[in-house]
Image (spheres, rainbow, N blue to C red):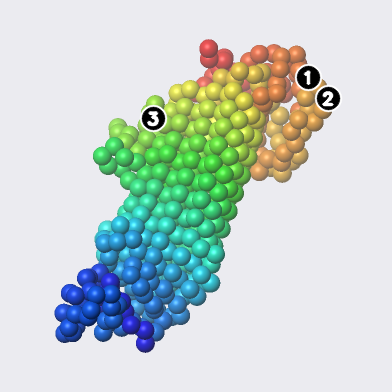
Amino acid sequence: MQRQPADFLVHRRGDGGIAMKKFGLIALLALAGCAAPATGSQTTTEQTPSNETASANSRTLSGTVEEPVVIDSEGDVTVTLEDADVDSIMIQNAKSATIVLKGDSIVRSATGGSSSEEDAKAAIYADCPLVLKGEGSLTIEGAADHGVFSKDTITIESGTYAISCANDGIKGKDGVTIQNGAINVESGDHAIASTKNKDGELGSISIEGGTLTLNAQGDGLHATGPVVVNGGTLTIDSAQEGIEGQTVAIHGGNTTITAADDGINASDPDGKDTDGMDPFSQSSSDCLIEITGGQTSVTANGDGLDSNGSLRVSGGTTFVYGPESGGDFALDFDQEGTFTGGTLVASGYAGMVETLDSEFPSLMAGLPQSAGSNVQIEQNGKSLLSFTPTHAFEVLLVYDGQFQTGDSLSVLGESVTLSQGVNTIGNVQEGPGPQGGFGNPQPPRR
């Protein structure tokens, strides 16, 4: 067996787990009943299992580790998983923690979590900033609670991840950042979450790159503060709400969302419960959905883009397919809705239609179509857009930064010459929409 260095004291916990406590060299030898060696010696009588090696604050796990692994250290901890099959991992009292992936590793979380703290049971748990990286893969199978949890922040720099769990897949209380990697999550609650909400600080999620495929019983991305998508490929195949945060900003990347309720929702975690209403549904000037770039497609059975504050679109290409009912629509905002560039196509049923204040002419077409039909839009006789809606619709809204007054626009066999404001074609009828109604579009706000 390999010898355990002096930086850790290894002992058996009451629940059978392996706990490692950092001690000084002399204290460790005293506990072991040995005399202190000469300065510079790294010899100790403590030993580790043959499938574990350690030096300073670095530890490597390989092969099968049947018991929960607990690391208690005040320094910067690095754990390397090298073709390891581990029950669960808990890192506590460290300044920071890094998990490095080599080969293909599994954390089975057979004990249902490695921490007894409320809202903190997880297959991999840390109470400090946690970084995951490497060229290998990590599978978390059937965790009874969270997959990866930190009371601080989580950053994924690289690696391949397959996470299946009963609660949140990846949860950093203070924040989650995805820089790169391939991440697949199936979760009983949110796929990726950050929920700090005290002392004026809110949890945040940032997607900088990587390929993410998320299936969640709760939300795909859920934060009490800002959610930012700057790059990568984000696919939310199923979720209650696709993305929820106090603010949601999409600046780049390719995002595809399928949601049972709202596709993207900006709501205030500090909203007040009045008359039995959900506090997350209350109007707030702190809430904002902003799209400045990227390629985004949203299919929702609730509102497609739903902001309890404002909605701003200034770039990118965005398709929003709202519900096949009149109770919600593709666009919903409580305060200001503006379009200043890019392309936005929004469709849904009559009854709750809201239109944006646009710097460019826009189109409202009352030309019902079924899901899967081919819709082509021509501008001055040339093809501008071609798309296949995932939901049937009665009304179609089109905003494009290339539209100019005097342009001839054709869609589904109907044509109109654009003037400033909302231009209507097809069977446009009166409806009870809150922002002027279907067939009675609100005038542009100035």
Looking at the rendered image, the disc whose residue lies closer to the viewer, 3 or 1, is: 3
In the picture, measured across the screen, residue 378 lies left or right of residue 436, that is: right
Residue pictured at 33% horizontal, 67% vertical: 57
For badge 2, the amino acid type reads Gly
Disc 2 and disc 1 in contact, CB within 8 angstroms:
yes
Residue, disc 1:
408
Q: Which mark is residue 286?
A: 3
Q: Compared to 25, does 341 lie above or below?
A: above
- Residue at 31% x, 83% y: name it: 47
The answer to whether the residues at label 3 and label 2 have Cβ atoms under 8 Å apart is no
Give the left or right position of residue 83, taking residue 10 as reference. Answer: right
Question: Taking the image as drawn, is residue 287 in sight?
Answer: yes
Mark number displayed over residue 96: none
Which one is in front, 420 or 90? 90
Question: Where does label 2 land, which residue?
Answer: 381
Q: Whole-Å distance between the Cαs marked 3 and 1? A: 39 Å
Give the residue drawn at x 30%, y 77%. Answer: 42
Q: Residues within 10 Å of mark 2 (few under 14, many from 20)?
A: few
With respect to residue 233, does 161 lie above or below?
A: below
Apparent side of residue 70 relative to residue 155 in the rendered image (left or right): left
Q: Amino acid at mark 3?
A: Asp
Label 3: how many residues lie within 10 Å, few (<14), some (14-19) or many (20+)?
Answer: some
> Mark 2 falls on what kind of element?
loop
Query: Is 367 left, or right, of 43 in this rendering?
Result: right
Q: Secondary structure at mark 3?
A: loop
The residue type indicated by label 1 comes to Ser
Q: Mark 1 packing: few (<14 Cα in 10 Å), some, or many (20+)?
A: some
Mark closest to the chain's N terminus, 2 or 1:
2
Instruction: Please state the horizontal and vertical placement of residue 112, each as a whole percent of the image.
Output: 35, 69
